[in-house]
Image: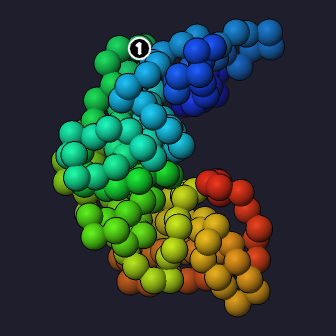
Amino acid sequence: PDGKTFYFAAYDNEKEPAIFKTSSAPGSSAELLAVGAPLASPMGLVLSCDGATLYIADLAAASADEAQLGAVLSLPTSGGAISDLGGGISRPTGLAMEAGCKTLHVTGRSAEGLPGVFTLLTEGGVASSLFTGEPLVSPSGIHVDDDGVSWVMDHRASGAAGEGVLWAIPRDGSRADEVASDLRMGTPGGVS
């Protein structure tokens, strides 16, 4: 939270998915925090407000629920075991922390395969659907502002100007409003 340490997902020298941390000081080297299973394709990272836990959206991790692909994971920033938070979200790609620091917003797919934005308590449990289905197609990057609006990047959705849409989903999940389109973003698209 003080901006002195950064966390990132990458592959180690053996081409295994891994999570690293590094100091923001010039010339610092990266320290390995976790490598290998259950990590498979870590895409989204968000830090807890106290800096003690890193949350990971892994697109393809083996999860506790064998019916789903991918998992939302937690890892102590001091190192240690990775935990599966559960939730029932398949193919999670993006994570954001709500202002109250107790709820994650996650992009991914429902058990029925619908694209959506879900909420999940930081201690885990069953996720709640904030918004699922059309007009979302492949939501990835997400940011939640102080008013609880989820700003969601969707690289495959088509908007008024073309493919690649930034959606705004209000706290009540009543709709997905197009903010901008024809963004031609990569996969996953990021937003902050």
Question: In the image, residue 177 lies at what x, y percent?
Answer: 55, 83
Which residue lies under the disc numbered 1? 79
| Residue 139 makes an appearance in the image | yes
Q: Residues within 10 Å of mark 1 (few under 14, many from 20)?
A: some
Q: Amino acid at mark 1?
A: Gly
- Name the one closer to the observer, 78 or 88: 88
Question: Is 67 rendered above or below residue 61?
Answer: below
Number of numbered discs present?
A: 1
Question: In the image, residue 35 lies at what x, y percent?
Answer: 46, 19
Q: Quadrant of the C terminus?
A: bottom right
Question: Is 36 rendered above or below residue 46?
Answer: above
- Name which residue lies at 75% across and 14% down: 25
Relative placement, left or right, of 2 versus 42 is right
| Residue 146 makes an appearance in the image | no
Question: In the image, residue 187 lies at what x, y percent?
Answer: 65, 55
Q: Quadrant of the N terminus?
A: top right
Question: In the image, residue 173 lies at what x, y percent?
Answer: 38, 77
- Name which residue lies at 42% across and 30% down: 39
